[in-house]
């Protein structure tokens, strides 16, 4: 090294990038929550699939320690093999593998639900009165299959009411970066005739920029969720590669969105 400059003051400490982000609205309600960033240690990547045959938790001791600061006890976390469907699984009482599902629900306090994404939406739904909690994995297929509506309905079966729900949409790919074509547009058109056009911006040659944020906000609203109770930071994974993972940008890391009833 050469050209060293001597200064009287020590250099400012390097700013530590955050290991996780939180939803202000859920935190204000006393609901422990977090979405991990790429700087969170101990979260398994997509190279380590979650399945019935792999009973190992996707969170190791480093993640357990890091997320404890957010009020989340990952020794009791539940997670599923996410299959881009709209099936609901009740979280096991002691946590662990919940089966193949894209919607997890619980009424158990202090038992986190985890959804893994890297462009898809993770949606958290909370009724403080029951109390009851859901976490859902929603990509374009999940949007077509009605995951947001199914999550609201699943909480309803646990005694929740749509108008009491608070919702939060985790960092995910935005309309700035999500170009799609067939078969996405035809399946959207089939599922939501006359409505899906409001969720896309046409590009050339039949391609469109898809806004899954606006689509799922609309679907939550139609399911009875009050729009001011939906928090969506509109943080695009593909625009924030320094902090997040984007599958479309070639990452295989997972972001984990977690929440637990108080
Ligand atoms: Zn973007």
Image (cartoon, rainbow, N blue to C red):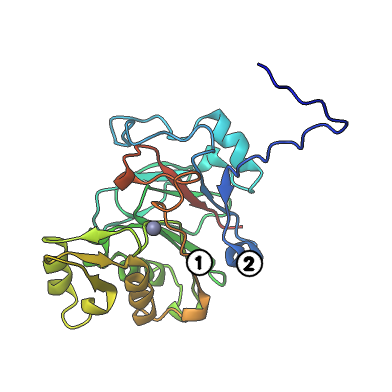
- Looking at the image, which residue is at 33% across and 75% down? 219
Q: Position of residue 252 (x, y in %)?
A: 34, 37
In the picture of the structure, the residue carrying the numbered disc 1 is 126
Q: Nearer the viewer, residue 144 or 89?
A: 144
Q: In which quarter of the image is the N terminus?
A: top right
Q: How crowded is mark 1: few (under 14 residues within 10 Å), some or many (20 or more)?
A: many
Q: Marks 1 and 2: in contact by CB < 8 Å?
A: yes
Give the residue drawn at x 40%, y 41%: 254
Residue 243 in view: yes
- Under tag 2, what secondary structure? loop
- State which image quarter holds ligand 1: bottom left
Q: What element carries label 1?
A: strand
| Residue 82 % position (x, y) | 30, 47
Instruction: Name the residue located 56 percent from the left edge and 72 percent from the top edge.
Output: 129
Q: Where does the image place residue 218, in percent across and percent down from the top left?
A: 35, 77
170 versus 201 height, above or below: above
Query: Residue lying furthest top in this view?
Result: 1
Tell me which label, 2 or 1, sits earlier in the chain. Answer: 2
Pointer 2 residue: 29
Pointer 2: residues within 10 angstroms few (<14), some, or many (20+)? few
16 or 169: nearer the eye?
Answer: 16
Q: In which quarter of the image is the C terminus?
A: bottom right
Seen in the picture, residue 101 relative to 253 is either above or below; the reply is below
Nearer to me, 174 or 163: 174
């Amino acid at each position: 090294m050469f050209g060293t400059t001597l200064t009287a003051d020590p250099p400012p400490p390097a700013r530590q990038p955050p290991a996780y982000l939180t939803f202000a609205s859920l935190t204000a309600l006393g609901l422990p929550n977090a979405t991990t960033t790429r700087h969170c240690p101990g979260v398994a990547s997509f190279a380590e699939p979650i399945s019935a045959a792999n009973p190992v938790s996707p969170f190791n001791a480093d993640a357990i320690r890091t997320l404890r600061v957010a009020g989340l006890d990952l020794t009791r976390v539940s997670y599923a093999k996410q299959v881009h469907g709209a099936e609901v699984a009740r979280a096991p009482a002691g946590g662990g593998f919940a089966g193949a599902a894209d919607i997890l629900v619980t009424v158990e306090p202090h038992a986190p639900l985890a959804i893994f994404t890297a462009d898809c939406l993770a949606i958290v739904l909370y009724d403080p009165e029951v109390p009851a909690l859901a976490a859902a994995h929603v990509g374009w297929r999940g949007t077509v299959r009605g995951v947001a509506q199914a999550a609201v309905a699943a909480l309803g079966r646990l005694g929740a009411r749509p108008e009491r729900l608070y919702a939060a949409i985790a960092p995910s790919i935005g309309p700035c970066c999500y170009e799609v074509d067939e078969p996405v547009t035809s399946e959207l058109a089939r599922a939501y005739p006359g409505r899906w056009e409001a969720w896309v911006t046409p590009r050339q040659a039949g391609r469109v920029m898809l806004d899954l944020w606006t689509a799922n906000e609309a679907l939550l609203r139609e399911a009875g969720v009050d729009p001011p109770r939906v928090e969506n930071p509109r943080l695009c994974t593909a625009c924030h590669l320094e902090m997040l993972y984007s599958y479309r940008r070639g990452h295989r890391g997972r972001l984990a969105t977690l929440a637990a009833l108080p």
